[in-house]
Image: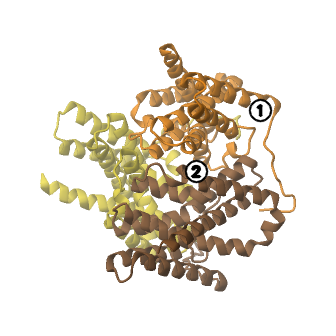
Chain colours: A yellow, B orange, C brown
């Protein structure tokens, strides 16, 4: 299934690109300068993976050592600045790629943790971290409550994807590649359906309690 | 002193639970969804320990690899949502367990750094980090100034606890277990007294300077 | 060039001190207590280096293991509290030392990454991280958008300094010591000129978009 790995890398870069665009747009709206936009784009695209790599002992983190990620972040910054009206109009494609990136990062994050010999819990937690970590860092840097903690099923979709990878690894019903495909499609479909139908996890708002 | 280690693990989980409750309550008051509450609870309970483990080279971090911590965070989330009126009423017990968790994390954090062969300064700094790191991450995620930086003697109590562990390790007046007990009790008592009598470190408010 | 290393260590501590002062002043203006001021001062002075060390596998991080840094942070806290009117008046010297610290941390950060056998991209990215990481952590803890992402050429100066170190290492036109000196002076001059003439990177403010 070597053909798959070619597709894999392409999807990985597509996900990185989508996350970088989402970061660049948010940073531009806050009035950050060229470097700031680029830094936020890179952070969103690679932050989750860097935290994962530090936690599993993959030194140096791939996001720092592999120039593809940096190049994609710079490209996304350039596009966001040069083609902003266009980028605004492709909001839906961005949500689409963002969902793709989320699914892919959840799956590859969990797989990388397993490949480094860690247990299933580490793999699930770091799959989620890889998928949502960059977005959380972006919101912390831009000084707002991380939206992923309060939005349509997002981190939960990553949880499902990572969980399928780990279960597949234990049960061995399918080959690792097929497990990845099933996890990827499930996570992706869950996120798209949540976006389409505004699915949310229950919120337990307490009318009488103000912060 | 094998009996002590049984007590130890129980206290460790009690501290984790208290921190998880404090995180879940704060997240619920901000209107986060089910996953968000659980994520904040887990972060508060395990964040400090994960930072410590990354800094001392304990890969993977225990907070990610040991399912007890995750289970306790999920349990705390469930209790906070299901029994919120009850949890609100046990505010004082939570402060009590929080102080216990603080003391225990300061002591175990310093001990773990020493056990990994690091020097006393690393042990003290990471003892404090273990004790207060989760709370700092919680406040960063919920977008407020970390209260532990501006409240009744809190991090300072952790400093005292971690310092006693390190001094005990150098001076060897007592066995490691007795040093832990002394450090634990001192830190715990200091925190409870600070809460009771509103002890604070000096603040150097500068009336004429506004930010 | 052993004499240089003596100068080196002195400059390193001067940079640490400048960063610690800038953190202590910001924390004091926010009304934090003694411990809070000291914690912020230490974080600004050592935060970037600790992140770098974790990413390159230098365990334990030098900022935690070497007491010089902690002592400098405590000294800076004491001076900021005891001599506040004086510290306020030396605002320009602080900007000067801050620029020196920025240049030095960018250069030493990149060099340390290379010394640990990592590639040029890791060195550049971690040179920047070392130089600006502490300031970003300070602003996150004090709950504001990191100013370094929106101010006069700052992180970009660190980028130039780190880039010169990496290029020097590849091209080998000069000895490592001379490369450091050139990188240091370039970064420092760039930052001072940017301060003096208010150079900024382009901002792409979008009048019609509000957050």
Tell me the crowding category of disc 1: few under 14, some 14 to 19, or many 20 or more residues within 10 angstroms, Cα based: some
Labels 2, 1: one chain: no
Tell me residue A70's x, y (percent): 37, 67
* Residue beneath the point at 65% across and 54% down: C71
Q: Is residue A170 left or right of residue A110?
A: left
The residue tagged 2 is A145
Tell me residue A111's x, y (percent): 28, 44
Residue C153 position by quadrant: bottom right
Let me know if residue A41 appears in the view.
yes
Residue that protrudes farthest toward the top in the picture:
B3
Q: Considering the numbered disc 1 on the image, is that residue within a helix, a strand or a loop?
A: helix
Let me know if residue C27 appears in the view.
no
Q: Is residue C98 left or right of residue A122?
A: right
Q: Considering the numbered disc 2 on the image, is that residue within a helix, a strand or a loop?
A: loop
The residue tagged 1 is B194
* Depth order, front residue of B47/C57: C57
Q: Which mark is residue A55?
A: none
* Residue beneath the point at 57% across and 44% down: B121
Chain to which the residue tagged by mark 1 belongs: B
Residue B198 position by quadrant: top right
**Residues under labels 2 and 1: Cα distance?**
31 Å
Tell me residue B52's x, y (percent): 50, 42
* Residue beneath the point at 69% across and 46% down: B149
Q: Is residue A210 above or below residue B178?
A: below
Tell me residue C93's x, y (percent): 71, 74
Q: Is residue A168 above or below residue C77?
A: above
């Amino acid at each position: 299934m070597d053909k798959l790995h070619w597709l894999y890398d392409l999807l990985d870069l597509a996900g990185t690109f989508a996350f970088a665009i989402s970061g660049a747009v948010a940073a531009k709206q806050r009035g950050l300068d060229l470097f700031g936009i680029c830094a936020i784009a890179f952070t969103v695209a690679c932050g989750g993976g860097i935290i994962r790599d530090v936690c599993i002992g993959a030194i140096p983190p791939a996001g720092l050592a592999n120039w593809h990620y940096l190049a994609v972040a710079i490209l996304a910054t350039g596009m966001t600045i040069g083609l902003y009206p266009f980028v605004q109009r492709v909001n839906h494609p961005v949500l689409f790629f963002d969902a793709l990136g989320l699914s892919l990062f959840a799956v590859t994050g969990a797989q990388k943790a397993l490949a480094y010999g860690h247990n299933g819990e580490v793999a699930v937690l770091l799959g989620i971290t890889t998928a949502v970590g960059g977005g959380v860092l972006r919101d912390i840097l831009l000084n707002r409550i991380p939206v992923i903690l309060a939005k349509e099923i997002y981190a939960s979709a990553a949880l499902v994807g990572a969980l399928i990878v780990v279960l597949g690894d234990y049960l061995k019903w399918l080959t690792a590649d097929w497990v990845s495909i099933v996890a990827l499609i499930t996570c992706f479909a869950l996120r798209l359906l949540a976006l389409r139908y505004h699915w949310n996890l229950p919120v337990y708002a307490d009318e009488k309690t103000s912060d």
